[in-house]
Amino acid sequence: MKNIFASLLLTVLLFLFIDSANAQKVFSVQYKSDAQVKVFVTQYASDADLIVYKAQYSSDAGDNNGVWFFTGYSSDAKKKIFFCDYASDADLKIYFSQYKSDAGWKNSSKKQLMY
């Protein structure tokens, strides 16, 4: 009985750890003051610090590699972001790609913003 309980507890803890460890889950906030990172979306990939691919499922989200999943609740997100109207107001410039293989950092000096 003790062995079964210990195995069950270990399994639950493992799933909780895996869920929080792999996710680059973001939530788009309405106000700049609520954001951890201010983001500007560029028109061209060459102008971006990070190429982002929007994952359709939470399980597809990456670990700071540009594969983002937008959560429905701020409490589920790793980072809260605000979309700026001007590049000069942003901490990070991103470009949205249609292809997951394009996702990644172009300016690795800004990588710490999304940890």
Image (tube, rainbow, N blue to C red):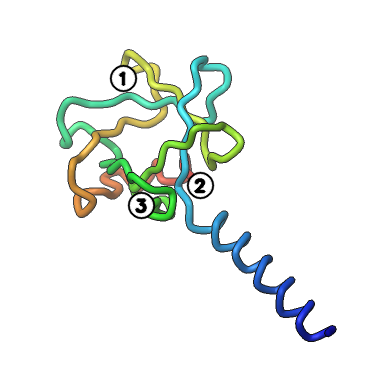
User: Which badge, 1 or 3, is on the more N-terminal residue?
Assistant: 3
Q: Which residue is depicted at the point 74% across and 71% down?
A: 9
At label 3, the amino acid type is Asn
Residue 63: x and y in percent read 43, 54
Residue position marked by numbered label 2 in the rendering: 115
Residue position marked by numbered label 1 in the rendering: 87
User: Which badge, 2 or 1, is on the more N-terminal residue?
Assistant: 1
The circle drawn on residue 65 is 3
Q: Residues within 10 Å of mark 2 (few under 14, many from 20)?
A: few
Q: Which residue is depicted at the point 39% across and 21% down?
A: 83
Q: How many marks?
A: 3
**Looking at the image, do the residues carrying marks 3 and 2 touch, with CB atoms under 8 Å apart?**
no
**Looking at the image, do the residues carrying marks 1 and 3 touch, with CB atoms under 8 Å apart?**
no
Q: Residues within 10 Å of mark 1 (few under 14, many from 20)?
A: some
Residue 23: x and y in percent read 48, 52
Classify residue 57 as left or right of residue 53: right
Q: Which residue is depicted at the point 77% across and 79% down?
A: 6
Does 67 sit above or below residue 10?
A: above
Q: Is 6 in front, or is 87? A: 6
Q: Residues within 10 Å of mark 3 (few under 14, many from 20)?
A: some
